[in-house]
Image: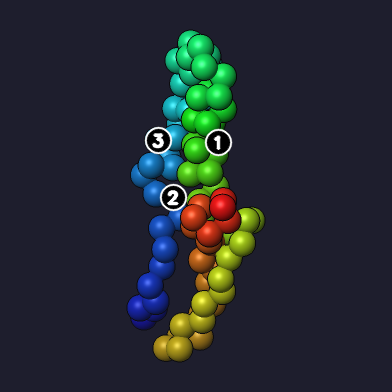
Amino acid sequence: MNNCKRYEKKRIINIILEDHFENFKETKLKLLKNKDMREHIKNVVEKALNCGNPKYGYTKYKCVSCNEEYLHGFSSNSFTR
């Protein structure tokens, strides 16, 4: 039996953002008159969606019990500063 700690592939916030952000951009975001605020919101959501994505950096772990290896993507705090 494999007792390794596994990280969630998709967190609920990512699912919500993926499912609804495009519609939000088309309907609500363009109503904001402040262009800087629109860009800021887009950037924050894109960073949240990329959080934990191994494409942007990761750490590889190996379980000492079963020798299984898995990747843990860096959080958005790791690569956005």
At 55% across and 36% down in the image, what residue appears?
Answer: 43
At 64% across and 56% down in the image, what residue appears?
Answer: 55
Amino acid type of the residue tagged 3 in the rendering: Ile
Q: CA distance from mark 1 to mark 3?
A: 16 Å
Give whichever of discs 1 and 2 has the lower sequence position: 2
Q: Is residue 31 visible from the viewing direction of this image? A: yes
| Observer-nearest of 26 and 36 | 36
Q: CA distance from mark 3 to mark 2?
A: 10 Å
| Observer-nearest of 14 and 41 | 41
| Observer-nearest of 27 and 41 | 41
From this view, report whether residue 37 is shown above or below residue 51: above
Q: Position of residue 41 (x, y in %)?
A: 49, 30
What secondary structure is found at the residue carrying circle 1? helix
Q: Position of residue 33 (x, y in %)?
A: 51, 12
Residue 14's quadrant in the figure?
top left
Look at mark 2 in the image and give the residue it sits on: 10
Look at mark 1 in the image and give the residue it sits on: 43
What secondary structure is found at the residue carrying circle 3? helix
Give whichever of discs 3 and 2 has the lower sequence position: 2
Amino acid type of the residue tagged 2 in the rendering: Lys
At 39% across and 76% down in the image, what residue appears?
Answer: 4
Mark 3, Cα crowd under 10 Å, few <14 / some 14-19 / many 20+, is few
**Callout 3–callout 2 Cβ contact below 8 Å:** no
What secondary structure is found at the residue carrying circle 2? loop
At 49% across and 36% down in the image, what residue appears?
Answer: 45
